[in-house]
Image (cartoon, grey):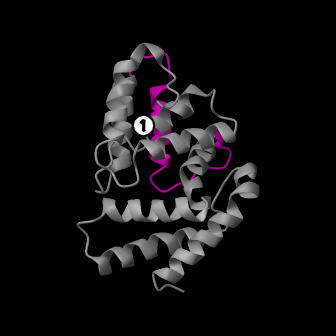
Amino acid sequence: MTPPWPLPHRADLRDRLLAAYADGRGYHDVRHLTEVLERLAELGWAEDRVVTLAAWFHDAVYDGRPGAEERSAQLAESELAGEDVDHHEVARLVRVTADHTTAPGDARGAALCDADLAILAAPAARYAAYVAGVRREYAAVADADFRRGRLAVLEDLAGRPHLFRTAYAREHWEASARRNLAAEIRDLGGA
């Protein structure tokens, strides 16, 4: 099933984005895109075209190299220029997903970041599939280096006062996300 697409007259763009997400990725694939869109709906943002388009573009360029979010944002700006949508805001939101840090009052950014990080709160089987998918994306990285890098990312997340920015996500996802993070950190030999 194709995830909801807010620009019916641009099926060509939708299809190119779907092809990018289907391009042999481990985790940042069509399933991830679909889950982010589902979490945005759960957060009450499904009708906001700007946020929905930012979700579609946020991992459009994903090659495991630094700056993928910036390249995705630039793609959004170029592809959406001339459309009846604030393409600069779409690109700004894509950029926010680089470190999942939002300014106070950035409701759109908070919603997108929470939807993107919601995988951290997934049930055990889905979380394990997510972890395995991330490892596949970095298959070229030696195990020890991957473990060290992954541990750094997880410990950074775990050290934040809140993983999520919206009240809904904090209430519904924070506790299970913290449990998943703690378990993976232990599995990787962290604190």
> Residue at coordinates 52% horizontally, 78% vertically from top-left?
185
Q: Residue furthest left?
A: 140
State the residue position of label 1: 57
Q: Position of residue 190 (x, y in %)?
A: 49, 84
Examine the structure image and report whether residue 21 is included in the region drawn in magenta: no
Answer left or right for 157 relative to 28.
right
Q: How many marks?
A: 1
Name the quadrant containing residue 111: top right
Segment tinted magenta in the rendering: 81-107
135 relative to 107, above or below: below
Q: Of 133 and 107, which appears nearest the observer?
A: 133
Q: Quadrant of the C terminus?
A: bottom right
Residue 1 in the image: state x and y as whole percent.
48, 31
Q: Amino acid at mark 1?
A: Phe
Which residue is more in the foreground, 150 or 187? 187
Rendered image quadrant of residue 157: bottom right
The residue sitting at 38% across, 77% down in the picture is: 147
Residue 88 in magenta?
yes
Query: Can residue 162 be seen here?
Result: yes
Which residue sits at x=46%, y=69%? 153
Judging depth in this view, the residue of 122 and 95 nearest the camera is 122
Left or right of 138? Residue 175 is right
Specify whether 93 is left or right of 176. left
